[in-house]
Image: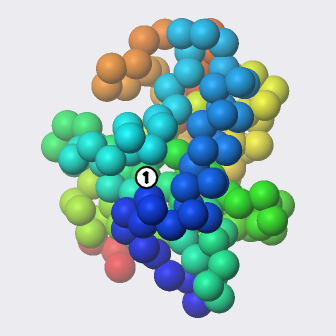
Amino acid sequence: MIELIEGNFDNPEVNELLKKHFVELRAASPEGSAHVLDIHGLKISSIKFWSLWEDKKLIGCGALKFLEKGHGEFKSIRVHDNYRKKGNGIKIIKHLIEEAKKLDIKRLSIETGAGKFFKPARKLFKECDFKECKPFAHYKEDINSMYFTRLIDTNLK
């Protein structure tokens, strides 16, 4: 059974996972093209953050940033290293989509890197029915970034 915990930044496991995520993505992104948020950046009021636990073990995390009405952006989706390549990325995204539905989000978008390091993330987003799109919100055209979006049906439970 998967448990979602909102916030939970002070949990040492969550804190470590987010720090690792930040360091790795900063290192993999060319200067000026890194859009990863640190823990402080995830604590702003326009973002909701969840950690996902299965049998009391942290499997990953993700956040939803509110853009304009009905439009949200996924941020900081991360699968714990011990749970990669086991279908947990899809589990995390499905749970985040369910949370987005509760918040009346109708469109979800994601920015990720265009380089080889980000290939697994792009594959995951496509598997979850995200389609490539033009830059959204504050993003600009950038050869180092790719953008994805999808509509979600908030009437489905």
**Residue 21, position in %: x, y?**
64, 43
Residue that numbered label 1 is attached to: 63
Say few, some or many: other residues with alpha carbon within 10 Å of mark 1 (under 14 / 14 to 19 / 20 or more).
many
Q: How many marks?
A: 1
Amino acid at dot 1: Ala
Please indicate, yes or no, whether residue 150 appears anywhere in the rendered image: no
> Quarter-wise, where is residue 83 in the image?
bottom right
**Residue 151, position in %: x, y?**
38, 50
- Residue at horizontal 27 percent and vertical 54 percent from the top: 105
Disc 1 element: strand
Question: Horizontally, is 151 left or right of 3 in the view?
Answer: left
**Residue 90, position in %: x, y?**
64, 63
- Residue at horizontal 45 percent and vertical 44 percent from the top: 39
Please indicate, yes or no, whether residue 67 appears anywhere in the rendered image: yes
On the rendered image, what quadrant is the N terminus found in?
bottom right
> Quarter-wise, where is residue 153 in the image?
bottom left
As drawn, which residue projects farthest toward the left?
69
Would you place residue 4 above or below residue 148 in this image?
below
Front residue of 106/88: it is 88
> Quarter-wise, where is residue 103 in the image?
bottom left
**Residue 18, position in %: x, y?**
57, 49
Front residue of 129/44: it is 44
On the rendered image, what quadrant is the C terminus found in?
bottom left
